[in-house]
Amino acid sequence: MVKYFDGGLDAVFHALADPNRRHIVEALSHGERTVGEVAAPLSISLPAVSKHIGVLERAGLLRRRRDGRVHRLRFQPDALARGSEWIETHRRFWEESFDRLAGYLEKHSTQRPDKH
């Protein structure tokens, strides 16, 4: 099994663990939004939204740019791709392991035990 540590990957999974942050990522996947536009459908305070945005920024999932007093947010899919690649690697590993186990069980379940 592939084993490695990637602090950036941990940050991505941590960021996506919260439903409010997933909502923000989903909203940004449709295009650039202001902080106010992202915050409007959420039932949390603006300071809480700002903290969630900070977590997403540190994970590399979004980029913020200031346009005067307006903060505009843009989704950065590369960070999400790292998480997807990690999941795919481990999915393949487990599928291959289960296929080998199924083959072993099939081979050995058709053999009858010797009687002594």
Image (spheres, rainbow, N blue to C red):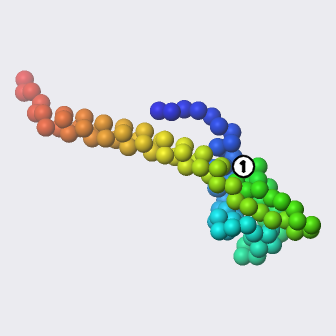
Give the residue displayed 75% in from the left and 69% down from the top. 33
- Mark 1, residue position: 59
Find numbered disc 1 in the image and state the secondary structure of the residue it sits on: loop
Using the image, determine if residue 71 lies above or below residue 8: below
In the image as oriented, which residue stretches furthest toward the right?
Answer: 68
Quarter of the image for residue 108 reads top left
Residue occupying the point 77% across, 74% down: 37
Q: Residue at x 72, y 76 (%)?
A: 41
Write the residue at 65% across / 64% down.
29
Most extreme residue toward the bottom, as rendered? 41
In the visual, does 50 lie left or right of 98?
right
Q: Is residue 104 visible?
A: yes
Instruction: Name the foreground residue: 37 vs 78.
Output: 78
- Amino acid type indicated by mark 1: Ala
Q: Alpha-carbon neighbours of circle 1 within 10 Å: few (<14), some, or many (≥20)?
A: many
Q: Residue 111: which quarter of the image?
A: top left
Q: Position of residue 85 (x, y in %)?
A: 54, 45
The reply, left or right, for residue 1 in relation to residue 109 is: right
